Amino acid sequence: MGRPRIEPVVWRAPRPGRKPKASLPALTVRQVTGTGAEDVLVDEHGHVFTGVEDGRVLRLTADGRRLDTITDTGGRPLGLELYPDGRLLVCDADKGLLLVDKRDGEIEVLIPAGPGLRVCNNAAVAKDGTIYFTDSTSRFDLEFWKADILEHSGTGRLLRRSPDGSVETLLDGLHFANGVALAADESYVVVAQTGEYCLNRLWLTGDRAGESDVLVDNLPAFPDNISTGSDGLIWIALAAPRDPVVDLLLRTPPRVRQVLWRVPDRLQPKEKRVVWVRAVDGATGRLVHDFYGKAPDYHMVTGVREHEGTVYLGSLNERAIALFGLP
């Protein structure tokens, strides 16, 4: 497959009138013993897995009563997926692409972090064990993710690891490559560009195999992790609404942006305390669900997973996961 070229999305202001009404159902918030439950994964038993900033991967039972530590990666676990052999696939920003045995916590390193994999962020797994995953940026470590978005360097990639262990780059030039989702029939893979407010789709089979297009563009918020729901929809975690200051900065010369991200954190734009997730049709990009609102004890959704009519949320900032039932 030849590598498609990703052209930068032309900047546009958010569409007028696109801010949703406060339509967020009541959340059930379940605490975990660590900060930054960034992603969420639900298994066939309804148990919820997440990773926190101290390196632990946790399992919360379906009833919310028991929390177990599966392993400690010694790094920063982000995206989580189920691997066909029953293990957990863990995207670790510090350690690389990992497989974790849920029974004893044993870790197998598939691809170590390093110059060739700076920030392993999110993944999707095919039935045969093929892994599609993102390397968000080649310039910054995870803690400086805001710098990559402001500098707008476009060094993120979508990669594929085949079952034989070979790795290839499918898309490059991505602006903070983030969430990954695979079509239910595995005909295409979708990747989120946080810094471009869009989702790109790469066709894997059929007459369009090897072609790339934009599934959703000009989102009104920063897309983070994405996932394919049991309903077949592509679910999008929207971490924070677009900031007019950031939009303005993205139109300034690169040298200006490089200076601005180095200003003290207290002077940089701050995310708004909202909860926002969407779901779109993977074939057309049509908006199907739009849940937006404020919760007193939860914000900054970075992970989303729909499972049998319940939507589970993760957050880079919270010591909890949250969930709500589809209306």
Image (cartoon, rainbow, N blue to C red):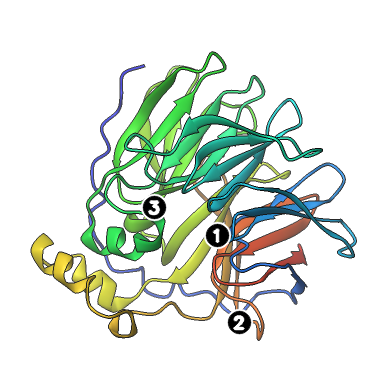
Residue 214 vs residue 80, the one in the foreground: 80
Q: Judge the density around disc 3: few (<14), some (14-19), many (≥20) Cα neighbours within 10 Å.
A: many
Q: Judge the density around disc 1: few (<14), some (14-19), many (≥20) Cα neighbours within 10 Å.
A: many
Q: Is residue 287 left or right of residue 304?
A: left
Residue 216 visible in the displayed image: no
| Sequence order check, earlier mark of 3 and 2 | 3
Residue 80 vs residue 115, the one in the foreground: 115
Q: Specify the label residue 198 is tagged with.
A: 3
* Above or below, 270 relative to 281: below
Estimate the spatial distance between the alpha carbons at disc 2 and disc 1, rounded to whole Å: 15 Å
Task: Give percent across and percent down for residue 131.
Answer: 55, 29
Q: Specify the label residue 237 is tagged with.
A: 1
Amino acid under disc 3: Cys
Q: Quadrant of residue 67?
A: bottom right
- For marks 3 and 1, give the one nearer the viewer: 1
Task: Give percent across and percent down for residue 55.
Answer: 60, 54
Residue 191 visible in the displayed image: yes
Estimate the spatial distance between the alpha carbons at disc 3 and disc 2, rounded to whole Å: 23 Å
Amino acid under disc 1: Ala
Q: Residue at x 39, y 80 (%)?
A: 270
